[in-house]
Amino acid sequence: MNLPNKLTVLRICLVPVLVLVLLLPVNMATTIIGAFIFLATAITDLLDGKIARKYGLVTDFGKFLDPLADKFMVLSAMMCIMYRSHSNELIFNIFMILVMVTIFRELAVASIRLVAVTNANIVVAANILGKVKTVAQIVCVMAALLEPVLSRINFLFFLGYYPITIAASVVTLVMTVWSGVVYLKTYWKYLDKRM
């Protein structure tokens, strides 16, 4: 249990705290605190990878747990945004689609990872597209949390149409699908161990 792995475990432990805060009544305080906790979890994601690579602390445990922690963090935040957006049909529907596509993608990639480790003893680490996808998801969640706060102080954001959130959602959707397809194409050969 080295420092990067401890940071990953910390990220997983922060997820229930994030969910608790985001399920409190929606107001500026809970939104800003929730965004801060989410950003803190995202920073631990950045730090654990950098520390692991810089100091040669990359482990199979870390390669497995780090992407799992990302999924917990992002999916929990997206589901909380759905809950908080029940009165805004557009944002609710966007995040419902994002959650469904993300879950499908993560189950497919997790299955490929399991098959690769079982059939070829290969632990599949995150690739660059997976990392870009995670950054896009983080930006999307932060936008969805903070843009409604901005709408209270800036007349450019009106009627619940949040352009930054919508744009970030589109990018997130594209990166989620694209990175998933690349994972499947790259590791498909391990589905049949005779190949």
Image: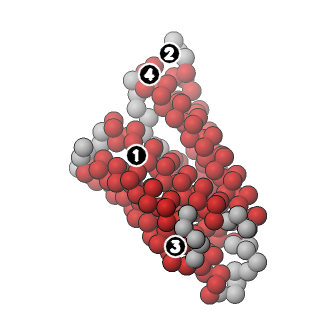
Looking at marks 1 and 4 on the same chain, the residue that comes earlier in the sequence is marked by 1
Looking at marks 4 and 3 on the same chain, the residue that comes earlier in the sequence is marked by 3
Amino acid type assigned to the residue bearing label 3 in the image: Thr
Q: Is residue 146 left or right of residue 14?
A: right
Circles 4 and 2: CB atoms closer than 8 Å? no
Residue 117 at what x, y percent from top left? Answer: 43, 26
Tell me how far mark 3 sits from mark 2, CA to CA. 50 Å
- Picture residue at 71% right of the left edge, 61% below the top: 92
Instruction: Provide the residue designation for mark 2.
Output: 193
Instruction: Provide the residue designation for mark 1.
Output: 66
Amino acid type assigned to the residue bearing label 4 in the image: Thr
Looking at marks 3 and 2 on the same chain, the residue that comes earlier in the sequence is marked by 3
Secondary element at tag 3: helix
Looking at marks 3 and 1 on the same chain, the residue that comes earlier in the sequence is marked by 3
Instruction: Provide the residue designation for mark 4.
Output: 118
Residue 195 at what x, y percent from top left? Answer: 53, 15
Q: Is residue 188 left or right of residue 48?
A: right
Tell me how far mark 4 sits from mark 2, CA to CA. 9 Å
From the image, which quarter does the N terminus lie in?
top left
Q: Is residue 81 above or below residue 68?
A: below
Circles 3 and 1: CB atoms closer than 8 Å? no
Q: Is residue 119 above or below residue 107?
A: above
Tell me how far mark 4 sits from mark 3, CA to CA. 44 Å
Dot in front, 3 or 2: 3
How packed is label 4: few (under 14 Cα within 10 Å), some, or many (20 or more)?
some
Instruction: Provide the residue designation for mark 3.
Output: 30
Residue 166 at what x, y percent from top left? Answer: 69, 65
Looking at marks 4 and 2 on the same chain, the residue that comes earlier in the sequence is marked by 4
